[in-house]
């Protein structure tokens, strides 16, 4: 009897959940999903972590993209298409990313993806996008492997590790005069890639690397590694990783009496870093592919729109998300022009995106080279001289 | 001819000497009882023989081979089987499978054979089922074959333990308080059964028991342990009248039977 | 309702007819409404119905085979959702095999293992390293990456390497028991992951956190496997073998010794069971299933990195086993399927659906409550509810039933002459 | 090499003790519940995390209302600690009622599943509430007790360097010591403590002694959770920033510590926590040196787990656990 | 008036019908014994009285009050002390702590001390072992501790479950002597025993249980001489 009751429960729950899910996707494929009913639906997916430890970043990408999409809605409606956002949660997990990528590939009305946050998720997922010819624009992946595989659909607007890292190294050594450097990284694909590139460039430039250590993401106590820093007495610490650990690291270093400058990559470009580190954040440098958005009118404009819409402050990745979506939509627009009112082919969209050579976004100018890297990806160097985000721009390096 | 020779057997737990240089000889084909007050070291003694504990000192000799240093499963292969004071069945599997586990060491099936279900493995498995069933018949549990062992009544569980032990084809069978929790009638039947086992199966039996009636009736030789030491050995009549034993264990009622 | 079920009971023909009808209807609806996840799930549900019918085992296997090999791929193949269904089915298959492996360790041998995903990782890396250029970093000979043809051999190699690690990890681990064992296995799982995450120096073996990209897809006679529907069949084939093996082990001398060890170690030993060997065998065989699926996983993802093998993953597999019903093969299969589908498909779809509603302005809820973010919450709630209302698992394990009549006859030949058996008497009260 | 290790030893010890103290108190929660129910309360890490959030939320609130400025910081902290531990204490009791008690007679592993469920549930719940209120689930509390000072180990011997401290570290260590002594006294010297031990040993018989077993179990959860919650507050003050996912890793480490010390043993949990903290810190600071640069700080968890495994292999019941020889 | 009365008790363990309509009564100052083979329901009867198991139907009337639905820890406060089968002392508590557990609801330290002295009168050996851990004592000592612990609550009704189990005959004699003594001083005792002969010898009355039912009842000496009882339980 127990079994039967369980069976019933199971059947009912499976049914109801399935029904819920079913009505959605079956509707979607028809391409005439309720709402305004003005023409064909084009969906753009985002795929970022919306839950778990790095959800803030994933969220900010999604929101940025959402803003861009909504601003463009009108334009596409005039062209006869209804734009829709389809956010997916990759949970920073490659398996989940690939499974979602299959869903994205299957849904013919999805013509592009903005994502992912993590290179580790991006790499396998993009293999799937490539199969289905779904163009992807990455707002955040800096690992070289992302574009080095030469996939036709994969593009990114941010700088590669092997550009950002050396840029930082150059600044650290030539401008800050660092001779002895201690490198710490968070043992993720992002942190390792950046730290490795930095280390190599720094060594080539003649600096001495006193230590190269890893920390664990999610932990809060980094005193062990900092004790090493303390006893090795470097004149600069480079950290490859994200702001959560970065902020903590800086704070604890200052508590230990380590007063030397810290430097990090775009993963440190967040207001939360300042929040976490507090006053300790002074004398911290970070490289970023974003120009100081608060200086430009577009940037200010963007920040206020974002704040108004979502009641949140912008994160660096919000703007990347926004620009990625804008670039994607620009390519889509071009593809539509040649499609005679039909849904443009994905290949076509991908081609058009790759063709973009001079798009001016909020934070960066975009022009793709033949493997999808952004030719205009510049690296800006910022410095926190007080506990206020963003820092002050100190330098600008372009290819 | 002796089948089991224990000499100078000693075991300490922390500071406590649980078994203190005990010597013992068990004749082949005999029924021997080990008695003594609670905590006297009787069960520890069994555990030393069956390899659950390793002795600190002394020797255990089965036939011509020493058992010291062997693991319990190796000792089982030498032909010693046992039951437990607190019943230790495989509670959540069927009665028949419990006995089939007893046949474990006779079965030859390996990983490969099992994986490919070779003819030999299939036949062997069928034979094992039949033999296990046979042992259930022998102890009178055949009709319970498909029940979970934990659902048997207490007395039946004790019998199943014996059937499982018999399935290993022991030369020496150790029974730890087989009559515990049985009423006099059941105990009488057990007495009979132990006798029958010896006749049928050519097995030597050593038992730990508190039921003096059973012990006196069944055993040919009795060893009395107290505080880990052997304080007496002999035939039932001798033990009954041994002053030391009466003091330490039996009390006056033993001398004046009800 | 009750009348219906009681009528159905015992009537095999009616059961077959109903089942076929059910499969037909759901197939048809899937065929027609291509993107309907509901239809897909309902079609999968037919396998569970099949399990509860009273048909002979061989027929059940046959029907299951037809549904899995023929019906499901065929009816879903024409629509746009095809690959994503196949992807989900493939991942389900991978998890089912792993859960079955863990079931041997936890369910049959009673050893709580919280680091099981390590073996999956070992399988994945075994193939990943040699099917990318990575191996050239430390192998003095050979040309890497190996061709996709080697995939088939690597399934076996992955199986053996994982089994070997199962034994290697098992040897020291087996001195500890119960919950201590849980934390030690957890430690081993973490050690493996951290080592893989860091083994890019001094010699670059695993490429560390960057992971191994562009793993060669399987290939046979020049035919490449790249799409989920192709992997689906690979997984199905391995899964078939795994289930066959599990069933055979479970009802053999080996399986009995596992259960004996689980129920009572001391008694098992006194029956002549070699404790260490028995436990190690459980570890090895359980691990080997994961190893094989690890290889498939690496080939399917074309990318291997340590983030796929976290503790959370081990816990999820354990949840599958316990939720399904420890020790019960059908239960564990169901548990793995339910949780994987829930995670990959149902929750995602519900999320998308609600998202759409909110973007369309039909409903509105705070961003913080977005269902995509509430997945853990939902999953957690489901776990608690299932634990409380179904503590024995979805399909509790059952013991085999032996046919008494056939044994009665055979038992005679085991009687030696002197043994006096009075049937059903023994020493009964 | 040895000189280098010695040089940094004072600092390593200070940091290790601070971290270890946190592990130790969380480990207490695991070990108490385990002792009484033989259940790995997977949700305990999340109770700790919730405590941290409640504490920070209160501190932020108090700052907003200007209370924090109006009273001595230490008084504010004590107030927050007391309120938080009462709240998390009741939360622990509630969790036991809802998710564990209905499963008291089910197989142990099923309760584990329920505990994992509670753990997920809490993570998302806290995230939701924080994000809903603040727009961001990473929460940074007001800066307190950040004064730094150092102990001049170098004046003892030149082979040591000085150890740097924050006031909060000192407060953390003092508070943990008070909690531990208090708990130890409670368990070993009071009637209810005795009742707890009795229930842990034999639940049925304890009920024959007029002990309301359910109440004792609730009490155990209350104390364990209250300690966990209070530690959460101390953690938040010490490290400044918290997020809903801190409970998982810390809980795992604390559980490891409990096992290291011998699970079910309260003093063992304390010792295990301290040991694990110091070991970890030592490994992070010195592995690079010890292995000539082959292994670095990233292997510190491997080091900690390896030591745990080695300990358990040679002493399967943990460092301070009593060997339970199964009665045969 | 009887101090305890069980009326038509039916108790189930899962699906097993363990007690099938048991009715017994115990008068003040009596020793009443329940005998029967293992699994007959003797322990279940005691557990039903002390509240560890709840009966499905029937009533347990203690001192005029129905306590059949009362949880064990409440029943224990009302003057019923249950010495469980297998003694169940707390192995890692000291002898002193074990005894203190028995008087858990007593707040007055002096009263506890007094009662402990009374317990030592019966069991002088416990005094010598006060600081020893319960689990390290021999079986006989553990039995004495378990009984002493029960006496600490100053019960008006003492339930003893198999006090002689697994003990040497010489210890069993001592235990039975103490049970007699307790009774002589006015304690009402309900005694469950395997050792039917000795139990019936000291009991005023006895009930014979078989598979959850009472098959016979009578005076202690009557039952001893009864043929079928002799046959089944004494012979």
Image (spheres, coloured by chain):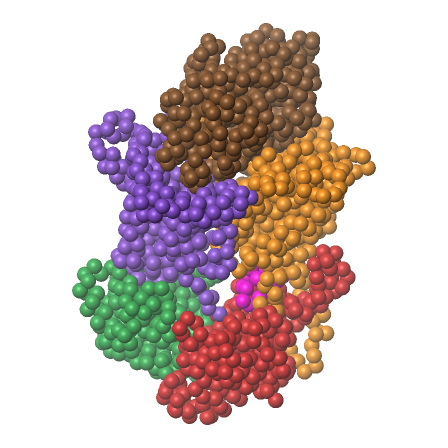
Chain colours: A brown, B red, C orange, D purple, E green
Residue at horizontal 37 percent and vertical 70 percent from the top:
E136
Query: In which image quadrant can residue E132 be found?
Result: bottom left
> Who is closer to the viewer here, E51 or C131?
C131
Q: Quadrant of the N terminus of chain C?
A: top right
Q: Residue furthest right?
A: C221
Residue at horizontal 56 percent and vertical 76 percent from the top:
B68
- Image position of C19 with respect to C260: above or below: above
Can I make out residue C274 in this image?
A: yes
Query: In which image quadrant can residue B135 be found?
Result: bottom right
| Magenta span of residues | C256-268
Can I make out residue E66 in this image?
A: no
Q: Position of residue A87 (x, y in %)?
A: 55, 24
- Image position of B48 with respect to C51: above or below: below
Q: Is residue A167 left or right of residue A310?
A: right
Q: Is residue C263 magenta?
A: yes
Residue at horizontal 49 percent and vertical 29 percent from the top:
A179
Q: How many marks?
A: 0
Q: Is residue A356 magenta?
A: no
Q: Position of residue E170 (x, y in %)?
A: 37, 83
Q: Residue furthest top?
A: A78
Prevalent SS, magenta region:
helix
């Amino acid at each position: 009897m127990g079994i039967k009751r369980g069976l019933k429960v199971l059947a009912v729950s499976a049914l109801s959940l399935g029904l819920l899910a079913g009505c959605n996707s079956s509707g979607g494929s028809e391409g005439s999903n309720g709402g305004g009913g003005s023409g064909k639906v084009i969906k753009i997916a985002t795929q970022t972590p919306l839950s778990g430890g790095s959800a803030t970043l994933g969220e900010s990408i999604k929101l940025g993209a959402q803003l861009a999409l909504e601003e463009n809605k009108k334009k596409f409606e005039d062209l006869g298409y209804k734009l829709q956002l389809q956010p997916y949660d990759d949970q920073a997990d490659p398996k989940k990313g690939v499974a979602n990528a299959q869903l994205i590939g299957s849904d013919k009305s999805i013509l592009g993806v903005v994502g992912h946050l993590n290179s580790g998720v991006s790499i396998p997922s993009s293999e799937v996008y490539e199969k289905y010819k779904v163009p992807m624009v990455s707002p955040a992946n800096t690992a070289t492997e992302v574009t080095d595989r030469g996939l036709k659909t994969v593009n990114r607007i941010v700088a590669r590790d092997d550009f950002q890292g050396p840029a930082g190294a150059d600044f650290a050594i030539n401008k800050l005069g660092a001779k002895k450097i201690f490198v710490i990284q968070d043992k993720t694909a992002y942190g390792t890639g950046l730290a490795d590139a930095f280390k190599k460039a720094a060594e080539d430039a003649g600096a001495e690397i006193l230590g190269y250590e890893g920390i664990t993401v999610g932990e809060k106590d980094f005193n062990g590694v900092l004790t090493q820093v303390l006893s090795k007495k470097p004149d600069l610490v480079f950290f490859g990783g994200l702001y959560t650990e970065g902020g903590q690291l800086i704070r604890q270093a200052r508590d230990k009496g380590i007063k030397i400058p810290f430097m990090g990559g775009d993963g440190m470009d967040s207001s939360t870093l300042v929040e976490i580190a507090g006053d300790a954040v002074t004398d911290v440098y970070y490289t970023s592919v974003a120009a100081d958005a608060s200086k430009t009118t577009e940037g200010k404009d963007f920040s206020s729109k974002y704040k108004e819409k979502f009641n949140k402050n912008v994160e660096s990745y919000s703007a990347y998300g926004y620009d990625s979506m804008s670039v994607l939509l620009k390519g889509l627009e071009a593809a539509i022009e040649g499609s005679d009112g039909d849904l443009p082919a994905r290949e076509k969209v991908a081609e058009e995106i790759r063709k973009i050579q001079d798009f001016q976004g909020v934070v960066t100018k975009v022009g793709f080279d033949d493997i999808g890297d952004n030719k205009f990806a510049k690296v800006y160097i910022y410095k926190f001289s007080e506990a206020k985000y963003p820092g002050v721009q100190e330098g600008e390096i372009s290819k | 001819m002796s089948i089991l020779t224990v000499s100078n057997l000693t075991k300490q737990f922390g500071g406590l000497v649980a078994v203190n240089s005990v010597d013992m000889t068990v004749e082949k084909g005999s029924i021997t009882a080990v008695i003594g007050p609670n905590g006297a070291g009787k069960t520890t003694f069994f555990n030393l023989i069956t390899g659950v504990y390793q002795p600190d000192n002394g020797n255990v000799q089965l036939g011509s081979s020493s058992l010291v240093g062997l693991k319990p499963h190796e000792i089982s292969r030498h032909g010693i089987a046992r039951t437990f004071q607190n019943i230790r069945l495989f509670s959540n599997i069927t009665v028949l499978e419990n006995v089939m586990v007893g046949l474990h060491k006779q079965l030859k099936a390996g990983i490969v054979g099992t994986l490919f279900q070779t003819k030999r493995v299939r036949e062997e498995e069928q034979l094992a089922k039949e033999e296990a069933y046979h042992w259930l018949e022998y102890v009178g549990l055949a009709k319970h074959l498909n029940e979970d062992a934990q659902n048997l009544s207490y007395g039946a569980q004790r019998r199943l333990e014996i059937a499982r032990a018999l399935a290993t084809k022991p030369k020496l069978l150790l029974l730890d308080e087989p009559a515990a929790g049985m009423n006099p009638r059941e105990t009488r039947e057990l007495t009979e059964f132990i006798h029958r086992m010896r006749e049928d199966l050519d097995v030597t039996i050593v038992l730990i028991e508190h039921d003096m009636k059973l012990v006196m009736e069944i055993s040919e030789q009795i060893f009395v342990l107290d505080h880990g030491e052997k304080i007496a050995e002999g035939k039932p009549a001798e033990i009954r009248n041994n002053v030391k034993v009466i003091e330490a264990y039996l009390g006056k009622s033993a001398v004046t039977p009800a | 309702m009750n009348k219906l079920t009681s009528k159905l009971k015992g009537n095999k023909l009616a059961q077959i007819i109903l089942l076929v009808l059910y499969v037909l209807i759901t197939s048809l609806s899937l065929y027609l409404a291509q993107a309907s996840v509901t239809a897909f799930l309902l079609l999968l549900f037919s396998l569970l119905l099949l399990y509860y019918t009273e048909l002979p085992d061989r027929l059940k296997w046959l029907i299951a085979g037809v549904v899995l090999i023929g019906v499901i791929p065929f009816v879903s193949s024409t629509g746009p959702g095809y690959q994503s269904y196949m992807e989900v089915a493939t991942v389900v298959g991978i998890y089912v095999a792993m859960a079955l492996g863990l079931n041997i360790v936890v369910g049959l041998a009673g050893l709580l293992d919280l680091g099981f995903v390590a073996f999956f990782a070992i399988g994945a890396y075994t193939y990943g390293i040699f099917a990318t250029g990575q191996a050239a970093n430390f192998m003095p000979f050979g040309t890497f990456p190996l061709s996709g043809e080697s995939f088939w051999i690597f399934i076996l190699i992955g199986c053996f390497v994982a089994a070997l690690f199962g034994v290697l990890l098992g040897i020291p681990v087996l001195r500890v028991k119960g919950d201590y064992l849980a934390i030690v296995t957890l430690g081993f799982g973490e050690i493996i992951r951290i080592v893989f995450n860091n083994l890019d120096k001094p010699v670059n073996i695993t490429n560390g956190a960057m992971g191994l990209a562009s793993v060669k897809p399987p290939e046979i006679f020049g035919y490449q496997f790249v799409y989920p529907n192709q992997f689906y069949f690979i997984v199905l084939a391995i899964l078939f073998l795994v289930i066959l093996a599990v069933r055979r082990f479970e009802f053999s001398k080996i399986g009995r010794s596992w259960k004996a060890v689980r129920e009572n170690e001391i008694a098992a030993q006194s029956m002549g069971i070699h404790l260490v060997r028995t436990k190690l065998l459980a570890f090895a065989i359980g691990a080997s299933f994961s190893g094989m699926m690890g290889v498939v996983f690496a080939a399917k993802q074309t990318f291997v990195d340590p983030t796929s093998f976290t503790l959370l993953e081990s816990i999820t597999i354990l949840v599958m086993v316990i939720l399904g019903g420890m020790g019960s093969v059908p239960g564990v299969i169901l548990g793995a399927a339910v949780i994987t589908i829930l995670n990959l498909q149902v929750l995602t779809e519900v999320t998308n659906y609600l998202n759409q509603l909110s973007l369309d302005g039909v409903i509105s809820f705070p961003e913080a409550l977005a269902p995509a973010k509430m997945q853990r919450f939902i999953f957690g709630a489901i776990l608690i509810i299932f634990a409380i209302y179904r503590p024995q698992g979805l399909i509790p394990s059952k013991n085999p039933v032996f046919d008494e009549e056939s044994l009665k006859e055979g038992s005679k030949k085991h009687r030696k002459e002197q043994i006096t058996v009075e049937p059903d008497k023994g020493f009964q009260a | 090499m040895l000189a280098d290790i010695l040089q940094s030893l004072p600092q390593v010890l200070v940091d290790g003790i601070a971290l270890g103290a946190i592990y130790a108190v969380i480990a207490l929660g695991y070990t108490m519940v385990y002792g009484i129910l033989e259940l790995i309360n997977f949700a305990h890490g999340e109770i700790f995390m919730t405590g941290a959030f409640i504490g920070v939320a209160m501190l932020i609130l108090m700052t907003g209302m200007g209370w924090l400025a109006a009273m001595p910081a230490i008084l504010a902290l004590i107030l927050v600690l007391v309120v938080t531990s009462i709240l998390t204490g009741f939360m622990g009791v509630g969790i036991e009622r809802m998710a564990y008690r209905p499963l008291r007679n089910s197989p142990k592993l099923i309760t584990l599943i329920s505990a994992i469920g509670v753990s997920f549930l809490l993570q998302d719940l806290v995230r939701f509430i924080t994000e809903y209120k603040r727009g961001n689930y990473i929460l940074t509390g007001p800066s307190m007790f950040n004064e730094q000072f150092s102990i001049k180990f170098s004046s003892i011997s030149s082979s040591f360097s000085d150890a740097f401290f924050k006031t909060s570290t000192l407060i953390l260590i003092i508070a943990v010591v008070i909690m531990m002594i208090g708990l130890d006294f409670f368990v070993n010297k009071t009637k209810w403590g005795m009742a707890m031990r009795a229930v842990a040993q034999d639940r049925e018989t304890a009920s024959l002694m007029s002990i309301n077993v359910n109440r004792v179990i609730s009490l155990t959860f209350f104390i364990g959770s209250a300690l966990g919650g209070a530690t959460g507050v101390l953690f938040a003050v010490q490290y400044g920033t918290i997020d809903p996912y801190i409970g998982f890793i810390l809980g795992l480490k604390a559980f490891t510590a409990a096992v290291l010390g011998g699970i079910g043993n309260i003093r063992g949990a304390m010792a295990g926590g301290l040991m694990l903290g110091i070991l970890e810190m030592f490994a992070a600071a010195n592995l690079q040196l010890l292995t000539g640069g082959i292994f670095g700080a990233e292997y510190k968890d491997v080091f900690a787990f390896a030591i745990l495994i080695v300990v358990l292999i040679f002493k399967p019941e943990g460092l301070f656990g009593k060997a339970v020889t199964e009665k045969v | 008036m009887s101090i305890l009365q069980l009326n038509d008790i039916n108790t189930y363990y899962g699906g097993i019908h363990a007690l099938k309509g048991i009715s017994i009564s115990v008068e003040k100052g009596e020793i009443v014994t329940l005998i029967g083979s293992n699994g007959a329901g003797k322990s279940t009867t005691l557990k039903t009285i002390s509240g560890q198991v709840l009966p499905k139907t029937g009533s347990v009337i203690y001192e005029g009050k129905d306590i059949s639905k009362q949880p064990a820890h409440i029943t224990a406060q009302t003057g019923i002390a249950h010495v469980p089968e297998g003694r169940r002392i707390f192995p890692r508590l000291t002898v002193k702590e074990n005894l203190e557990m028995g008087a858990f609801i007593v707040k007055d330290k002096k009263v506890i001390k007094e009662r402990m002295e009374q317990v030592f009168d019966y069991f002088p050996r416990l005094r010598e072992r006060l600081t020893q851990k319960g689990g390290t004592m021999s079986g006989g000592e553990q039995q004495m501790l378990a009984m002493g612990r029960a006496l600490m609550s100053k019960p008006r009704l003492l339930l003893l479950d198999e006090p002689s189990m697994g003990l040497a005959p010489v210890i069993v004699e001592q235990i039975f002597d103490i049970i007699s003594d307790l009774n002589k001083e006015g304690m009402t005792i309900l005694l469950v025993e395997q050792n039917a002969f000795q139990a019936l010898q000291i009991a005023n009355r006895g009930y014979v249980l078989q598979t959850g039912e009472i098959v016979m009842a009578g005076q202690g000496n009557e039952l001893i001489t009864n043929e079928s009882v002799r046959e089944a339980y004494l012979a």
